[in-house]
Amino acid sequence: MTFDPNQSLSQEAVDERVDTAIEENNVVLFIKGTRHMPQCGYSDRALTLVGRHREEFEVVDALESLEEFRTALNRHSGRETIPQTFVDGEFVGGSDILLELEEQGDLGEQLTA
């Protein structure tokens, strides 16, 4: 069984999903995998860091159509990397930025702003 991470959604469908997730959620993470099964270390780190400060946040699995998600996210953040975190519609960063904010003691405040 092989896994093709770029198989099922049109760019238009992904654009709509990304736009809606960012607009309708206070905090949203776009990751590789799911909340219970992150598929890369960076996604796992982002989930762990956000989970330390918030119980409720949206998680979107970008593996469903990886290249389309990269394109859609780039429109909002100027970056194609995944994971990406948005708070109140604003791009915060990936797992590296979340870790930096955590080390500075600012992540909790950023996630509740």
Image: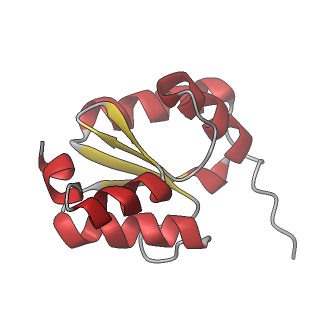
Q: Residue at x 73, y 40 (%)?
A: 67
> How many numbered markers are drawn?
0
Q: Residue at x 65, y 30 (%)?
A: 71
Image quarter for residue 48?
bottom left
Q: Position of residue 101 (x, y in %)?
A: 31, 56
Residue lying at the far right of the rendered structure: 2
* Residue 47 sits above or below residue 6 on the image: below
Asked if residue 63 lies left or right of residue 59, the reply is: right
Q: Looking at the image, which is closer to me, 12 or 105? A: 105
Q: Residue at x 25, y 41 (%)?
A: 25
Q: Which quadrant, please, contains the N terminus?
A: bottom right
Residue lying at the far front of the rendered structure: 104
Q: Position of residue 12 (x, y in %)?
A: 61, 23
> Can the viewer see residue 55?
no
> Can the viewer see residue 95?
yes
Q: Position of residue 4 (x, y in %)?
A: 82, 58
Image coloring type: secondary structure
Q: Residue at x 61, y 39 (%)?
A: 69
Q: Which quadrant, please, contains the C terminus?
A: top left
* Residue 60 sits above or below residue 1 on the image: above
